[in-house]
Image (cartoon, rainbow, N blue to C red):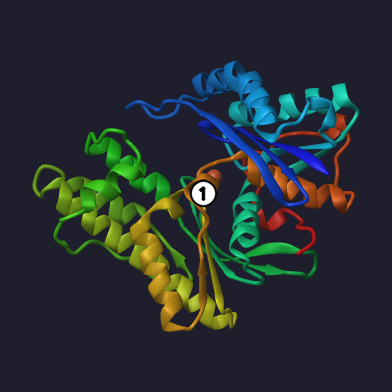
């Protein structure tokens, strides 16, 4: 079943095409965030302008005509309202024109399931880390199949914390990825460390790090923030792993692209003889392939939505989304 998946929850307009779990295309156009952060109306405008081209390129890569597409999926949420609406409207337009079914996909489920699929993980404990979200999850099947949240951030996502620090340090680009580069060679400074059971918090760490700007070197600040934040995530994850008797770790979401975090969680896995899985960068960045992949599973289980009921949900929690198949 050739399925097209559309993703536009934040700065990326992504289009993926999947057939029986095989990824045939994964194309995207990313809004240039510059130094000003994300202005929702501007990002949505970028998505509207690039949607057609990205869809056409994805179809070319997959070697398919649009009429050969048998189903469509789009990100329902969580995300930024005006941005989400672009994929929603595009998906409805395609579905109406072709007379095919639509699946509304939870963005977080997309990241989790594409990683399980590509890394061959069966029943992992999940560390989902992105801009807006930082959660530890495990699949449970009661009262319905979903990813249950065992621990999460009390305030901001680890990605937003790193992006915010990058902006305040005037790094270019003003993303968390610049923190990783700048951290190399830095020395460790003691910073606030907040873990409560399997939950954690990042605002105290960010406030303290911000106060140190100009007093300590950028390298030392970046290194210390990374080490502190990621140690918090590792401690909480390890606790959740023990409690759930898990022998696999799934690391996914935008911040999963950070190699220092990957290495730290690999060490946690090694210590417990567990398997560690983290997909390639393109699947941890926002992408359409993960949406197409989940949509295919949903449509196989008749989990489609009538066009008039297709909506967006900015705060679509992962634990309210039903998951299908293995
Ligand atoms: Fe994402």
Q: Could you say where residue 136 lies in the image, as x and y percent from the top left?
A: 54, 65
Instruction: Mark 1 and ligand 1: say if the CB distance to the nearest ligand atom is below 8 Å.
Output: yes
Q: Quadrant of residue 121?
A: bottom right
- Residue drawn where x is 71% and y is 55% of the image: 320
Q: Nearer the viewer, residue 260 or 168?
A: 260
In-front residue for pair 204/116:
116
Residue 205 shown left or right of residue 219 in the figure: right
Residues 224 and 112: in front is 112
Write the residue at 58% across / 33% down: 27
Locate the C terminus by quadrant: bottom right
Q: Position of residue 316 (x, y in %)?
A: 66, 46
- Per the image, the residue denoted by label 1 is 284
* Numbered marks: total: 1
Q: Position of residue 266 (x, y in %)?
A: 42, 70
- Residue at position x 65%, y 53% in the image: 109
Residue 321 at x, y = what percent? Answer: 73, 53
């Amino acid at each position: 079943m050739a399925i097209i998946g559309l993703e536009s929850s934040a700065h990326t307009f992504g289009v993926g095409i999947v057939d029986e779990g095989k990824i045939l295309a994964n194309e995207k156009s990313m809004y240039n965030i510059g130094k000003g952060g994300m202005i929702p109306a501007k990002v949505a405008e970028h998505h509207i302008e690039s949607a057609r081209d990205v869809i056409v390129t994805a179809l070319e890569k997959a070697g398919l005509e649009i009429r050969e597409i048998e189903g469509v999926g789009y990100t329902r949420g969580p995300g930024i309202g005006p941005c989400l609406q672009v994929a929603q409207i595009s998906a409805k337009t395609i579905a109406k024109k072709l007379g095919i079914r639509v699946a509304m996909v939870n963005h977080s489920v997309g990241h989790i399931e594409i990683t399980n699929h590509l890394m061959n993980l069966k029943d992992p404990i999940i560390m989902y880390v992105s801009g807006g979200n930082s959660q530890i999850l495990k699949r449970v099947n009661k009262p319905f199949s979903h990813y249950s949240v065992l621990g999460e951030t009390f305030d901001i996502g680890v990605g937003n914390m790193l992006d915010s620090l990058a902006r305040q340090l005037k790094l270019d680009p003003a993303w968390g990825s610049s923190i990783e580069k700048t951290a190399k060679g830095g020395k460790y400074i003691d910073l606030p460390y907040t873990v409560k059971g399997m939950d954690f918090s990042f605002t105290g760490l960010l406030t303290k790090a911000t106060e140190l700007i100009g007093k300590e070197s950028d390298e030392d600040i970046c290194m210390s923030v990374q080490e502190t934040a990621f140690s918090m995530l590792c401690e909480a994850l390890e606790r959740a792993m023990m409690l759930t008797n898990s022998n696999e770790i799934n690391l996914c979401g935008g911040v999963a692209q950070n190699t220092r975090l990957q290495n730290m969680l690999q060490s946690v896995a090694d210590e417990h003889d567990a398997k560690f899985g983290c997909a390639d960068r393109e699947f941890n960045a926002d992408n359409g392939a993960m949406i197409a992949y989940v949509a295919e599973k949903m449509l196989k289980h008749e989990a489609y939505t009538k066009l008039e009921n297709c909506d967006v949900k900015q705060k679509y929690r992962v634990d309210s989304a039903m998951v299908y198949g293995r």
